Amino acid sequence: MNSGYWRSYTAYRTVDTSHWETRTRQVWVDTSYMTSSGYWRYYTEREWVDTNHYEYRMVWVEDGFYTAPLHGEVIIDKSPKFIFTKWHKDKNNEECCMEMNLSWKVDNSELLESEEEKEIVRIYIYQDIYRFDNKGIEKVIIFNEDISPSAEGSINTITWFDYSGSEDSILHVYLYAQNGESAHIYFSNPINGFRSINLNSQGSSSDANIWLGGNSYGKIEF
């Protein structure tokens, strides 16, 4: 894995931008005989202009070490199967929400003997809701915290959504290891509202699991 940083240092280097310049000046032409008399005459000459100078530059200093990529698995358990905005009521007559359990397990089996075990130290989860009627994208932060370093663990989240969104709405999960590596998992997660669940009188031939977001459990390897 390559890494590095910017370090300032002074390097002396001749920068040659010398050139020829044309200059015009006046000189006195003496044409006197018995008395001093004469006139001014203009002439042109070329003179070399030396513009050498020192300059300071930033240079990239590379360092780093070899490390095996981050590998493992993530399991996401989402409830309920179809997510609605908080303006709907669930079977307990409470605001609808999304409960989600995220568990992970980092694969450290291929580490070199000199390498430390990789652990997850931070988790960032958010959802981009693509609102209907071209109202833009609403970003909802679900979880964004440092956690106790762990190669295997889980967290539980509960989220209420103000706005409905189409099947283009994506839920993103980022797992960060202590060495700076990360894993990114994402999937479609529509948020249903009053308009998004209305069907016409003839019904619909489309798969509700697609446009209503019927995914509730998934296992992803990275």
Image (cartoon, helix red, strand yellow):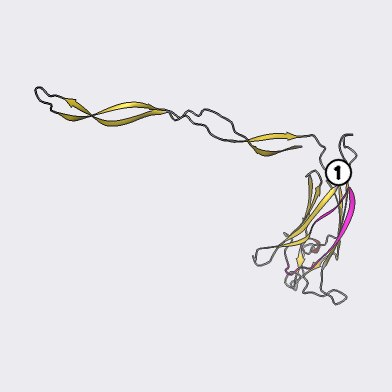
Identify the residue at the far left of this view. 34
- The residue positioned farthest toward the front in the image shown: 35
How many numbered circles does the render carry? 1
Residue stretch in magenta: 144-164
Q: How crowded is mark 1: few (under 14 residues within 10 Å), some or many (20 or more)?
A: many
Residue 42, position as x, y percentages in the image? 22, 30
Magenta-colored stretch includes residue 117: no
Task: Give whichever of 115, 14 is nearer the camera.
Answer: 14
Query: Position of 130 compared to 148: left or right?
Result: left
- Judge whether 64 appears above or below 174 on screen: above
User: Relative to residue 131, is residue 89 depicted above or below?
Assistant: below
Percent across and percent down for residue 145 are 80, 57
Quickly name the residue at label 1: 118
112 sits left or right of 203 in the view:
right
Give the quarter of the image for residue 37: top left
Secondary structure mostly seen in magenta is: strand
Q: In which quarter of the image is residue 137?
A: bottom right
Type of amino acid at the residue the image marks with label 1: Lys
Label 1 residue SS = loop
Q: Give the quarter of the image for residue 10.
A: top right
In this rendered view, identify the residue nearer to me: 199 or 157: 157
Image coordinates of residue 41 in percent, x first then y, are 20, 29
Q: Is residue 35 above or below residue 97?
A: above
Q: Where is residue 122 in the image (x, y as percent from the top left)?
A: 81, 52
Does 154 lie within the magenta span? Answer: yes
Give the residue displayed 56% in from the left and 35% down from the top.
Answer: 56
Residue at 10% of width from left, 25% of height from top? 35
| 124 or 210, nearer to the observer | 124
User: Which residue sits at x=88%, y=43%?
Assistant: 107
